Amino acid sequence: MQTSIPFVFMRGGTSRGPYFLRSDLPTNLNVLADVLIAAIGSGHPLNIDGVGGGAAVTTKVAMLSKVDDGWADIDYFFAQVSVEDKLVDFKPTCGNILAGVANAAIEMGLVTPSSDTTEVKIHAVNTGAKIVSRVQTPNHQVTYTGETQIDGVPGEGAEIQLTFKGVAGSSTGAFLPTGNLRDTIDGVEVTCMDVAMPVVIARAKDLGLSGYESADELNANRAFFDRMEAIRCEAGKLMGMGDVCSSVTPKFSVIAPARQGGTITARYFMPWSTHPTMAVTGAQCIASCALTPGTVADPMAKPHSGSPATVVLEHPLGNIDVVVEYSMQNGFSLEAAGIIRTARKLADGHVYVPSSVWNGLS
């Protein structure tokens, strides 16, 4: 016997995964984790027994609820399911999967298109962040056709504008969780910053890298990953996050000078593999680091004249632009960050999990 669960399968930005109604899933988080592990097929490198794609960017899950809290329209609850380890992390959020939330909410009947452009206010349950998503809905119909291209995704699609608010310190409660612009861990200078996602940022050269390696080259460098993980786990303690060795947060990034006309070059880790492009949440944190005097990015990043600033991050497959609104009255203070993404509905229907995992009753 199997339990069927309705879902919409979406590409959001440069990630992909199932989008569920939260009400169609178990309320108990331990049971929910088991259901998501079964649905994704975690425990096999190809996720052969589920709908995952064998990579961290294709084992992500969005769970949506309609809400009326005086501001938000939709609650977005995110889960990162591991590819092979049968683990689920409910601590982080994902900005790429977020790119598909407004569209999925319309597809699921949670939101009614209002005009040719529909604004959906989203509350990120995991971090408390507030995001305004503006999606294209000509003739009150969601569309995925357009002329916007994002690096890391073939073809073009309808533009989705994401504006993030209240993301500084969203996970740890502080923009600089250690209280310092720079810390030294295992002889390596890092900046530990929390903007949309807590990230430990280091100079590539300090870890024996150029910073321009491909994702495959980095993934093959296990000595680097071993050293990075030791630094990340120690940084997690300094950031007040406790033992993070089994958690996907904080993330890790290495930076180098831009060489294709951007602001800075960055490689981002999830954390046990290299992101093929760049995470939307991580991009906001790295962009903030690039704009903040005294961090490991100073003076590597190209300077900006003032707010708003467009920070161009060069990643393995191209660039991502982050528009940052900030103040420097009392040091760097983030006010909002904007990203352009696309999304596409890939499939819908039901995903099935063994009834021994969940019988659908609670």
Image: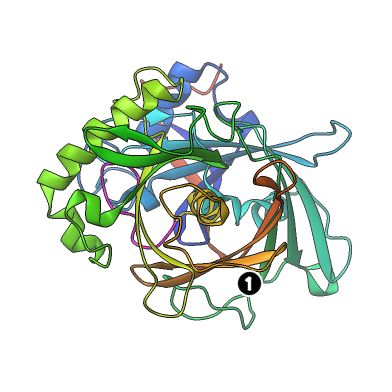
Q: How crowded is mark 1: few (under 14 residues within 10 Å), some or many (20 or more)?
A: some
Q: Where is residue 43 in the image (x, y as percent from the top left)?
A: 23, 35
Instruction: Tell me which residue sits at (89%, 33%) in the image.
Output: 70
Using residue 246 as the reference point, say whether residue 339 is left or right of it: right
Q: Position of residue 87 (x, y in %)?
A: 33, 29
Between 324 and 98, the residue placed more toward the observer is 324
Between 189 and 50, the residue placed more toward the observer is 189
Instruction: Tell me which residue sits at (51%, 50%) in the image.
Output: 289
Q: Where is residue 150 in the image (x, y as percent from the top left)?
A: 51, 73
Amino acid type indicated by mark 1: Tyr
User: What colouring method underlies this structural image?
Assistant: rainbow
Using residue 43 as the reference point, say whether residue 357 is left or right of it: right
Between 246 and 284, the residue placed more toward the observer is 284
Regarding mark 1 in the picture, which secondary structure is present there? loop
Total labels: the figure holds 1
Between 121 and 357, the residue placed more toward the observer is 121
Instruction: Tell me which residue sits at (75%, 49%) in the image.
Output: 109
The N terminus appears in which quarter of the rendering?
top left
Is any part of residue 134 visible from this angle? Answer: yes
Asked whether 345 falls inside the magenta stretch, the response is no
Q: Magenta-highlighted stretch: main secondary structure? A: loop
Instruction: Tell me which residue sits at (32%, 37%) in the image.
Output: 82
Q: What stretch is highlighted in magenta?
A: 269-278
Would you place residue 173 above or below residue 229 in this image?
above
Is any part of residue 342 visible from this angle? Answer: no
Would you place residue 339 above or below residue 92 in this image?
below
Would you place residue 228 above or below residue 292 in this image?
above
The C terminus appears in which quarter of the rendering?
top right
Q: Where is residue 201 in the image (x, y as percent from the top left)?
A: 39, 46
Residue matched to label 1: 144
Which of the 4 image quadrants contains residue 138? bottom right
Residue occupying the far bottom of the picture:
147
